[in-house]
Image (cartoon, grey):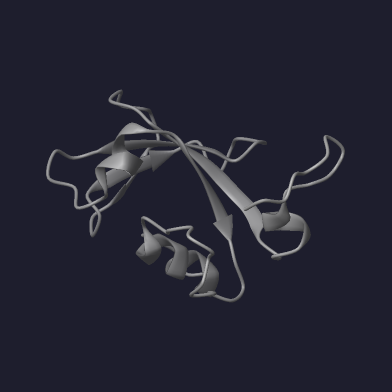
């Protein structure tokens, strides 16, 4: 994108595309009390329900089918009401979770 945003302007994802911030996912290898297991993706999540900033700690089984980028690098997740196929070069790495969140379904 060639659009330069000013310091006082919100990002296009929220101001024009209608996306809503959901969480920041942070990979960890530490067991966290109260974590919840998501068996179909073979990973644990914790913190989202109590973090005022939407921080979600994610601990993965060795054989988790999740993309390595999600397993190793913190990420920001958004909720979107309409899935737009043309993201002008942007790629969704983990679409199944996005679909569950859009439909408002609980993951387990």
- Pick whichever, 54 or 108, lies toward us: 54
Q: Quick one: 91 or 100, which is closer to the camera?
A: 91
- Residue 78 visible to the viewer: yes
Q: Name the residue at 51% across, 72% down.
A: 86
Quadrant of the image occupied by residue 107: bottom left
On the image, which quarter does residue 108 sit in?
A: bottom left
Residue 83 lies, in percent from the top left, at: 53, 74
For residue 84, side relative to residue 17 (left or right): left
Residue found farthest to the right: 8
Q: Residue at x 39, y 42 (%)?
A: 45
Which residue is pictured at 39% across the width and 64% down the height? 95
User: Which residue is painted at 27% across and 48% down in the image?
Assistant: 67
Q: Residue furthest front?
A: 2
Q: Position of residue 98 (x, y in %)?
A: 46, 63
Question: Residue 11's x, y, as percent?
Answer: 73, 48
**Residue 84 position in % (x across, y down):** 54, 74
Q: Does residue 105 lie above or below 8 as drawn?
A: below
- Total marks shown come to 0
Camera-nearest residue between 102 and 105: 102
Q: Residue furthest left?
A: 63
Please say whether residue 107 is visible from this viewpoint.
Answer: no
Query: In the image, 103: left or right of 62?
Result: right
């Amino acid at each position: 994108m060639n659009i330069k945003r000013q310091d006082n302007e919100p990002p296009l994802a929220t101001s024009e595309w209608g996306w809503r911030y959901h969480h920041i996912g942070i990979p960890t290898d530490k067991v966290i009390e109260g974590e919840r297991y998501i068996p179909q993706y073979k990973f644990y999540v914790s913190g989202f329900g109590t973090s005022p900033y939407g921080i979600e700690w994610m601990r993965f089984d060795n054989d988790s089918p999740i993309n390595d980028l999600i397993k190793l690098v913190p990420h920001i997740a958004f909720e979107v009401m309409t899935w737009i196929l043309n993201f002008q070069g942007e790629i969704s790495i983990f679409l199944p979770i996005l679909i569950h969140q859009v439909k408002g379904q609980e993951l387990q």
